[in-house]
Amino acid sequence: MKIQDVLLSDYGKASSIASPVNQLMTDFAVDFRDGCDINLGVGYVNERTIPHQQIQHACENVLAHPKKYRASLNYGGAQGSPNLIESLRRFYIENRIGGITEQILNNRDIIIGANGATSLLESITHLLPAGIVLTADPMYYIYCNDLGRKGFRVTAIPEDEEGLDAERLRAKLKMLGDEKAAIRFFYVVTVNNPTCTILSNTRKRELVDIVTRLSYEVGRKIPIFFDNAYSDLVHDSAVEPLASALCYDPLGIVYEIGTLSKILAPGLRIGYLIGSKGPFLNGIIQRTSDIGFSAPLINQEIASYLLDHGIEAQIQKVNTGYYQKAKQVKAWMTELLGDNVQECRGGSAGFYYYLTLVNVATDTTSDFFKFLTRTTRQEAVDGPPGSQHPKVIYIPGEHCVHSDGEMVEVGKRQFRISYGFEELPQIHTALKLMRSAIAYSHENSLGYHCT
Ligand SMILES: Cc1ncc(COP(=O)(O)O)c(C=O)c1O
């Protein structure tokens, strides 16, 4: 008898095919040559920013003090370690992060995700019914891809230099008309990934105001989630300190998502959510229990210890490193890519630059991409089989912009590079190769026009 394969749900079917970026990164990783190929595509932090010794010291201290850090190798509670929650409260209040006060936190809860900020973002998709999600374009493609597979309709509004464009958002809401009732939530990354555009305080307040009014209009609270993944990584002192949207949230619709991945270590998998107490937050706590009971308790206690012992100096150190790299990479981009760059975003926070090239396509079928991944099939360009020239990977803009949005065309000339993971000499080599890739694209398009 013919037997059919496992019956998959719609989500199962959509997830059985790797997302384009996952596929790209996997293909590149398969035959990655250490010391030769250069990965400007990954969102990994720089290894040297991870405080290995302090983490080891924190772990020893946690295990040595079972009275404070109770049963740290056992299961944890689903809201998160009380020690870690207290440490986060102290960290926010004592450092006045985003202007947050004790009073603001008193009406709200802090909850710890099962596996970083990612698990909290994912949990939202289980608690809110499918419908429209509004976000900025270019968008955080990893989460937006997940939303799409879960049946949400992502609507991306182009950003300007202050973040998601409020004027365009108003126009979009007007256009939606009765469909506004299908809006489920807003997702705004405060230092955007991929662009590292910083959402200005004025714009943030404006967005909360728009969503508050919209909530009254549809007669239901519409949550706005601010993803603060990179908000502790503002390394340019000219940027005004980022205010927390929790400071101007009369209706209790603002939720802020934070992570210790970028300032301590992604491997700890500690992300947290701050928002108004109520059924939604209770649902997230239950969801954390459902998917894994809690984040590993030992990691939570280590994070708590690190927050209580020298986190401020650690953040300073991380930012000094990224600041220097950002400056150097910018200088090299100007020198090597020069007039070929139409627009460059980033450089003040996080660790990405997002570039728009003049007249050079960057998508996976382009000459630029083929040159850098050594897939031109011309030995003179790629190098001999078995010892090809160095490859460089980046995230093509085509994967960062919404496929039905206004940025599709320009997205084909854009790309994200990370100055986080790779060290400066490798980034310099990669930029020189990018200059050659641009020249190769121009030669090819000239050849094409002549024939
Ligand atoms: C915008 C954004 N949100 C969330 C995350 C993931 O954070 P976590 O490591 O806590 O899951 C990332 C990671 O790169 C990110 O870029």
Image (tube, rainbow, N blue to C red):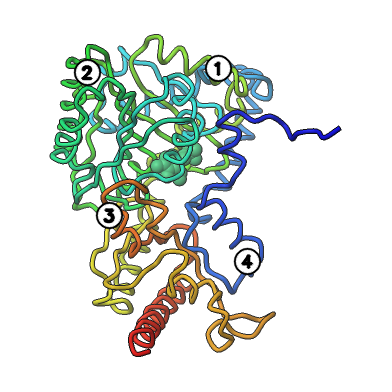
The amino acid beneath tag 2 is Ser
Ligand 1's image quarter is: top left
Against 281, residue 73 (above or below) is below
Q: Which residue lies under the disc numbered 3?
A: 348
Q: 263 left or right of 222? A: right
Which of disc 4 and disc 3 is earlier in sequence? 4
Front in this rendered view, residue 409 or 390:
409
Q: Position of residue 411 (x, y in %)?
A: 33, 58
Discs 3/4, front: 4
Secondary structure of the residue carrying tag 1 is: loop
Which of disc 1 and disc 2 is earlier in sequence? 1
Which of disc 3 and disc 1 is earlier in sequence? 1
Q: Which residue lies under the disc numbered 4?
A: 32
Calculate the distance from the C-alpha at mark 1 to the C-alpha at mark 4.
39 Å
Against 260, residue 301 (above or below) is above
Secondary structure of the residue carrying tag 2 is: helix
Q: Which residue lies under the disc numbered 1?
A: 78
Against 110, residue 338 (above or below) is below
Secondary structure of the residue carrying tag 4 is: loop
Against 47, residue 363 (above or below) is below
Q: Which residue lies under the disc numbered 2?
A: 215
| CB of mark 3 near ligand 1 (< 8 Å) | no
Secondary structure of the residue carrying tag 3 is: loop
Calculate the distance from the C-alpha at mark 4 to the C-alpha at mark 2.
49 Å
Is residue 262 in sight in this rendering?
no
The amino acid beneath tag 4 is Phe
Q: Residues within 10 Å of mark 3 (few under 14, many from 20)?
A: many
